Amino acid sequence: MTTGLSKTPPVRGTQKLVDQMGWVFRRPLLVFLEIAWRWLVGVPVIYACWRQGHAILAALPPESTGLLTINFNNPWTAAVQIAEVWSAYAPHVAAAVTWLAPAVALAWAVVSGLGRSAVLCRLEPGARFRPLAMMLLQSVWIVLYAAIVYAWIRSIGWVAATHITISGEADLVGYFIWTIFLSLGYFSLWALVSWPLAVAPPLMVLEGRSATSAFVESFRLGRIFTSKLMEINLVMGIVKLALIVLAMVFAAAPLPFADELGPEASQVAGIASIVFYLVASDYFHVVKLKGIVEFWRLLRGEAQPPHD
């Protein structure tokens, strides 16, 4: 099968990243579509979590759990107190997650299938709008993402259980070292293993494949294409980390001037930082998708006949 690789000069996965960023920036409708479908799920989910949080606090008032008496001036004492408070609220949180998580997963699969199909059709005007097949691929993405998150939560739970105990002094240094190490490790693991699910939707739309065929084909792209996809995924993961750090810096900027500006300034800065991160993250999602499409054109292009 001819793919045109021999005629293509070597290009790094992120060599044209700046050009792709500029291309997406000049097409704000693409970013708007990405923001629209993500926030269409995100805003109701935040509201549902807020309602559930109020319901849990109503059933188990903070006064009865010691939540209001945590001594934050002493981090070692506070760590043990927080562990005790969490043990009281954990069953209520678990009960809410039991029904909320499947509902969120279903809503995400449906809305993301529609939204990602719309964005891809906008990127490639001749592409077919295939939301049902896209929903299936997004469901596989959710399962893999949920597995990574579950493994991370279990790992952090192990760290907490072994470093913060009620019977002795909390080992906060060890706890934070392990937490940072595991968080970065799982973050990198997700970047390394999620690339097949990132390229499967473009393959399905651009090559006219079924969802199953596109997912299987994502593992058979060859070393050159696969290496570029992994590079793009890792770089975008680093960009996400940089955005998180930048948002934290913006959120903390008013703290030295808290006496002059008041507590409202910190709240406004915090909300603005969260919105900034979400919008920037959505923008880079489109940039990543544009990069995948560009490398598909470069490395596969019209050499692949339609499969459906």
Image: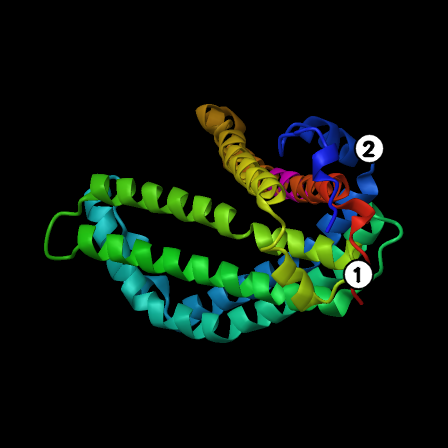
Q: Amino acid at mark 2?
A: Arg
Q: Amino acid at mark 1?
A: Gly
Q: Which residue is mark 2?
A: 26
How far from the left and from the top, in percent, is residue 213? Answer: 68, 65
Q: Is residue 13 above or below residue 260?
A: below
What secondary structure prevails in the magenta region? helix
What's drawn in magenta, residue-wise? 276-282
Quadrant of image for the C terminus: bottom right
Q: Which residue is mark 1?
A: 208
How far from the left and from the top, in percent, is residue 289? Answer: 70, 45
Left or right: residue 302 compared with residue 250: right
- Residue at x-position 33% and y-position 60%: 154
**Quarter of the image holding residue 273?**
top right
Mark 2 lies on a secondary structure that is loop
**CB under 8 Å between discs 1 and 2:** no
- Residue at x-position 78% and y-position 50%: 33
How far from the left and from the top, in percent, is residue 41? Answer: 66, 60
Colour convention of the picture: rainbow
Q: Residues within 10 Å of mark 2 (few under 14, many from 20)?
A: few
